[in-house]
Amino acid sequence: MFQDVQDLGVLSNASAGFLAAFFSSFSLCPTELIKIKMQAAKEHAAQTKTAVERESAFKITHKILKTEGIMGVFRGIVPTMAREMPGYFFFFGGYEATRIMLTPEGKTKDECGKLLA
């Protein structure tokens, strides 16, 4: 019923990347949110020429959880998925297509990197 992973084609690998990005977005979104908040605070302080106390990632996370709850750390999950899922689709699909195109006749995809040997 299931194919060997080594035998998956371009579309199958691209689809696997697409689905992988869905799940990875749940860890990427909160970290991106915290990173952006830290960058924005630094930029705001630079533009207003004010000294601002740098907040740690833990402090920012605590503040979000306290004011918005667990859903607050997932603010932006839909745009994150909209960015990541097509990106992973084309990355995984492009990688697999490149492997197929670079495979010498009579060799396997795993041997495509050994062209000069």
Image: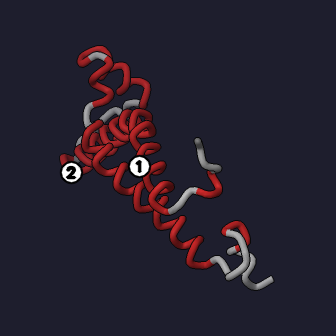
Instruction: Using the image, determine if residue 77 lies above or below residue 112.
Output: above
Q: What residue is drawn where x is 54% and y is 65%?
A: 96
**Label 1, label 2: how far apart the Cα atoms are:** 39 Å
User: 107 and 98: which one is in front?
Assistant: 107
Q: Residue at x 58, y 72 (%)?
A: 100
Identify residue type, mark 2.
Answer: Gln
**Outermost front residue:** 1
Rendered image: mark on residue 47: 2
Displayed quadrant of residue 78: top left
Q: Crowdedness of circle 2 by 10 Å Cα count: few (<14), some, many (20+)?
A: few
Task: Identify the residue at horizontal 41%, vertical 61% (top origin).
Answer: 90
Q: Is residue 16 left or right of residue 81?
A: right
Amino acid bearing label 1: Phe
Q: Secondary structure at mark 2?
A: helix
- Residue farthest along the right direction in this orientation: 117
Q: Residue furthest bottom?
A: 116
Q: Which residue is mark 1?
A: 18
Q: Establish if 102 lies above or below 97.
A: below
Q: Position of residue 110 (x, y in %)?
A: 71, 66
